[in-house]
Image (cartoon, grey):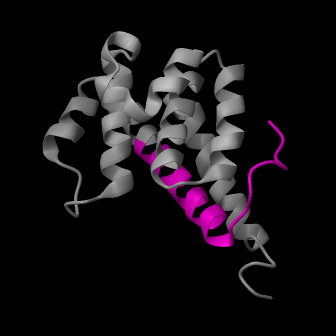
Amino acid sequence: MTLRTRLLDQAVGRAMSTLSATAKKGLGDPALAELVVIRASQLNHCAFCLDMHLALARKHGVSEQQLDLLAAWEEAGDVFGERERAALALTEAVTVLTDGFVPDEVYDRAAAHFDDIRLAHLVGLIIAINNWNRVMVGRRIPPGGHTT
């Protein structure tokens, strides 16, 4: 089978789903989790994941203003709290890895808002959505067809 005819081996798909679910649950804030996965999906141009997670974000009470301004969160003033801004900065740093590493100041900023366990879950969530984005973009999976 070619890459485009099979999404993932079932065992790999289950492992990725388990990582995603465990990281979200451990973060303990479903709305923040959705902001994180949406921002990574924006950076990775993943239409499938954006479509799915925008719907989930709305279900978890994320405001339309936050969703509208997420791509410009750094310039959005007080639309995002400091904890959200720290998580979004870490999301961008882990997703893009422009300098080949996450800058210490970005990691330290996140560590100031999340205990060690929640920070580990946040990093796990960022890793998980980046994996999903790469699968869906690599396969050119269009938006829709998901259940939320």
Q: Quadrant of the N terminus?
A: bottom right
Q: Is residue 112 left or right of residue 36?
A: left
Q: Residue at x 80, y 36 (%)?
A: 148
Direction top: furthest residue: 78
Viewer-proximal residue among 51 and 133: 51
Q: Residue at x 66, y 62 (%)?
A: 136
Q: Residue at x 65, y 37 (%)?
A: 53
Where in the figure is residue 61, as x and y percent of width and height? Answer: 64, 15
Asked whether 140 falls inside the magenta stretch, the response is yes
Q: Is residue 116 left or right of residue 42?
A: left
What secondary structure do most residues of the magenta stretch adopt?
A: helix
Magenta segment:
123-148
Q: Is residue 121 left or right of residue 115?
A: right
Where in the figure is residue 110, as x and y percent of width and height? Answer: 28, 32
Where in the figure is residue 126, as x and y percent of width and height? Answer: 46, 47
Q: How many marks?
A: 0
Asked whether 80 falls inside the magenta stretch, the response is no
Query: Where 44 sits versus 104, above or below?
Result: below
Q: Residue at x 56, y 64 (%)?
A: 134
Viewer-proximal residue among 137 and 6: 137
Query: Where 14 sits versus 82, above or below?
Result: below
Where in the figure is residue 127, as x and y percent of width and height? Answer: 47, 53
